[in-house]
Image: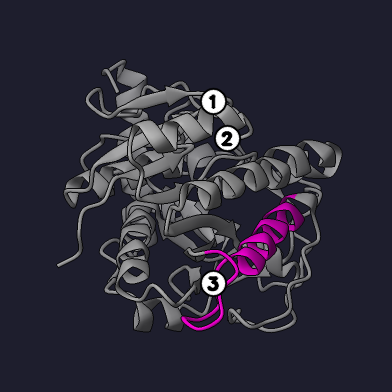
Amino acid sequence: MTDKITVLVTGGGGYIGSHAVLALRDGGWPVVVLDDESNSTGVLVPADVPYVKGSIADRALVAATLRDHRIGAIMHFAGSILVAESVTDPLKYYRNNTQASLVLIEEVVAAGIPHFVFSSTAAIYGAPERLPIDEDDPKLPINPYGVSKWMTEQMLADAARPSASSKVHDFNYAALRYFNVAGADPQLRSGQIGRTSTHIVKIATEAALEKRPHVDVFGVDYPTPDGSCIRDYIHVSDLAAAHVAALEKLIERPSENLLLNCGYGTGLSVIEVLDALDTVVQRKVPRVIGPRRPGDPPQLVASNRALVETLDWTPAHADIHRIISDALAWERKLADGTPV
């Protein structure tokens, strides 16, 4: 039976972080959220969850939060998240993702926090030469977002203990490398609310409800069967459950670190996702074909063998129609003005 230590969720007011908060609470874990509201407003955080507004780059605030709330583990989601923006404003990503994470890691070490779960990304692999992608495949990110996340992984790897007999600092970590995250909490307690989202499912469901005039398809000249990018889509609630399972494994095996791809091992093209949307809503949602978006690799599909074999985790929502249906229900809730 895993002890229920208090978990600090950085970026816990955002899309994925808020779902992790729900998964932790559903599992009986005490939770504290730290969020600077650069990608959120805090509205997705349950009212009874302690909420600290501020940045992980604020060393004094982080130290006080870890001390005052007696934090026993970290789930780190805070950071900048837009691939295209990272190409046009790379220093923002090294500042918000890499430099700020360094401050957080240093304070975690100083406070003696033993477990750290990091929100990483499939973007660290760049444009892979083979599919599905294995955790040991080359790390050749093609955009600053991916580089900033890979640099943070490297900091964790260098700082954390590699084995029980050889340790630098006394903590272990899990780096969960997300593929394309989509959907919403099936109970509609959380979902995507950001207006700058570049996620195709979010944009497509908005278009289905006529919040947008159409869906932009960025490129149909990639070396894929229908010319559009192929991605491995994972339901956000399945991903949140993987975070809790990873934390439990870190506690169970304190001398081990985890590097895990988070996906279903199945690739779908942008066109296939939009076709699935049309099936769900039973009509054709308008599409506009445009040029490629900077920094997008043609295909990213996970090998999730390590995830399934290492963690006590089985996906509950591994179907693109389910993912779209949950996302659509969330968009309807927002459109109806129902309180989040």
The three-letter code of the residue at mark 2 reads Ile
Q: Residue 301 appears in which quarter of the rendering?
A: bottom right
In the rendered structure, which amino acid carries the disc numbered 3?
Arg
Helix, strand or loop status at disc 3: loop
| Residue situated in front as seen by the camera: 26 or 282 | 26
Of the numbered discs 2 and 3, the one sitting upstream in the chain is: 2
| Residue at mark 3 | 161
> Does the rendering let one see residue 213?
no
Mark seen at residue 36:
1
Q: Is residue 156 magenta?
A: yes
In the displayed structure, 279 sits above or below 42; it is: below
Residue 276: % across, % down: 43, 56
The residue under label 1 is which amino acid type?
Asp
Q: CA distance from mark 1 to mark 2?
A: 8 Å
> Is residue 193 visible to the viewer in this orientation of the structure?
yes
Please tell me how crowded label 3 is: few (under 14), some (14-19), or many (20+) other residues with Cα within 10 Å.
many
Instruction: State the image coordinates of residue 137 (x, y, percent, origin top left).
Output: 67, 82
Q: Which residue is mark 2?
A: 56
Whether pointer 1 and pointer 2 mark residues with C-beta atoms closer than 8 Å, the reply is yes
Observer-side mark, 3 or 1, equals 3
- Residue 10 in percent (x, y) is at 47, 39
- Which mark's residue is nearer the viewer, 2 or 3? 3
